[in-house]
Image (cartoon, rainbow, N blue to C red):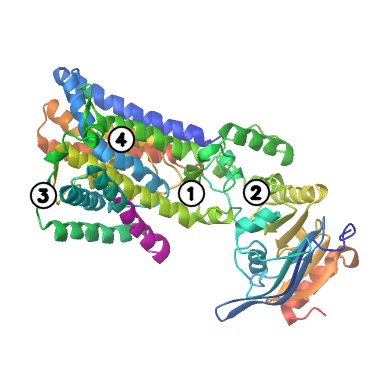
Amino acid sequence: MADKNSHTPLLSMTHIDKSFGEVEVLTDVDFKVGHNEIVGLVGDNGAGKSTLIKIITGVHPPTSGEVYYKGEKITLHSVKRSRELGIETVYQERALADQQALWRNVFAGRELIHKFGFLKVKQQKQETNALLRDHIGFTSKAITTDSMVLSLSGGEKQGIAIGRALYFEADLIILDEPTMGLSLSETRKVLDFVRNIKEQGKSAIFISHNIYYVYPVADRFVILDRGKIAGEFLKQDISQDDLVEKMVQLARTGKLN
Amino acid sequence: MKTARLQQARLEISIAAVLVGIYLLFIIGNPKVFTRFDIYYSFMSTIPFFGIMALAMTLVVTLGEMDLSFPSVLALSALMFGKVFTSTGNIWLAVLVCLLVGLAAGALNSVLIVRVGIPSLVATIGTMFFFRGMVNVIAEGKGISFVKAKGTLIYALCVGRIGDVIPAQAVWMLLLGIGFWLLLHRHKFGSHILFVGDNMDSSRMMGINVERVKTAVFMQMGFFAAFAGILSTLEVTYFWPSQGQGYLLTTLAAVFIGGTSVFGGMGTIFGTFAGAIIIGSLEAGIIAIGLTGFWIQLIYGLIIMVSVSIYAILLRKKT
């Protein structure tokens, strides 16, 4: 499926190294995401998944290595810059503020404003409402643009965060452990949100340490282990059971084969 | 279903009810005093000095931070106001320098808090002593007379009496109240304050410049402390080195009685405005209804305990 429409991948990272002081977190990592491709980034806790993501989103600069986006070499030095390029992140913590209304959360950091910085409150509420009903597909009347985040369930919060990314026309959406701490039915909802990304022609990186959640929605799997890429598989080349088998083996022996 | 608007409305109705209740008590307790204009004239001339600082403090508390240094900032900037005025005779220059000193003091606070990383409560205890110490060293215990400022345009604008009945400082507080309300509830900057106060990490992830927001909030606190310094100095046409000390707890009490949450992420300008009126009229009210001055602190404490208990119950999270 991936890379059919275009020769250059959407995102391409080569020879990425990252260390914090003496601790080397990523070593010589090559990582690609194609157009309209969902990449499952899997690996144990501490494998370096979150660090890799923070490099893509501009939170941390890489110690060395190059990042290409849509064929152009870029230096991501801020969250703002990566967003301008069309990279959105849905963090594990969801980046929502509990006591604030949804209409403030959706536009946090990207408010719709009049001259002199005053908010277009009405427009923000209308857009938020459209986002809730159309993009995310909330039907519950209990959730309104004035609802506080703390009154939503975990899956609903994740839906808001993903919907927000889609609303801002991101080409690449990064999902950092989106199913963490969710019940089974809530997890199913989140997986539907991820499928929605694919249907809308966008790409995503789905980070998880649970293969069972990643497998149904991803096109390709990248396994990260102790800061290095341990292996890559297309979904058509590997079954879910084999992939799990390989992960178990990796955890036990440190090798894939 | 909990909505942010509903919660805010409940808080603001509660504080309005407390305000009305207290005034009913005063009017019933001493109709002679509280049905005549004089007492309100007196309130309008005294409340704005700490009321304006309470408005600015609301932003600090909404951010989840604290500032204890503002009474010292008030004194330091008022001292500079006096020094420049007496040495140059130019009151406009004196006002400019005074406000710049306030901004600079706020900037020093934000450097300690944002760059060095000291918790704001601790950092501002330090600067509270430091700024007051500067005042003591420079003023050497001496006050400064502002009698010459009378008759200047600045004097009339700051503390003049509009139509001989309305103190100008009350108009300032009203205008600033509206301005702060717009800023906190209807402006991008206010939205950022709410977001940072609610969840700093989320704000950072959403690309909000957390450091810049904090710096701006502490600087405006310094600025309005300096402004309150100008007003309070001109009102009595005198600067004295311990100026502002009485405002520390009244200002904070106004913010908390008003319903702004000490945990950050939630603030109400309306509440602070009403809170300042309550705090500012209690003393006179208690005396007027026939209690002795010994009762004042007890009733302050009672009202603070009752109002914050109401808020705690209103805000209790469903588990």
| Mark 2, secondary structure of its residue | helix
Q: Are marks 1 and 3 in contact (CB under 8 Å)?
A: no
What residue is shown at x 63% (from left), y 49% (from top)?
A: A154
Q: In front: B284, or B80?
A: B80
Tag 2: amino acid: Ala
Which residue in the structure is indicated by mark 2? Answer: A161
Q: Is residue A26 above or below residue B123?
A: below
Residue B304 placement (x, y as % from top left): 28, 39
**Is there one chain holding both mark 1 and mark 3?**
yes
Alpha carbon of mark 2 to alpha carbon of mark 3: how far?
58 Å
**Is there one chain holding both mark 4 and mark 2?**
no
Q: Nearer the viewer, mark 2 or mark 3?
A: 3
Of the 4 image quadrants, the one containing the N terminus of chain A is bottom right
Q: Are marks 4 and 2 in contact (CB under 8 Å)?
A: no
Which residue in the structure is indicated by mark 1? Answer: B198
Alpha carbon of mark 1 to alpha carbon of mark 2: how far?
17 Å
Which residue in the structure is indicated by mark 4? Answer: B275
**Is there one chain holding both mark 4 and mark 1?**
yes
| Mark 3, secondary structure of its residue | loop
Alpha carbon of mark 1 to alpha carbon of mark 3: how far?
43 Å
Tag 1: amino acid: Asp
Tag 4: amino acid: Gly
Q: Is residue B63 above or below residue A134?
A: below
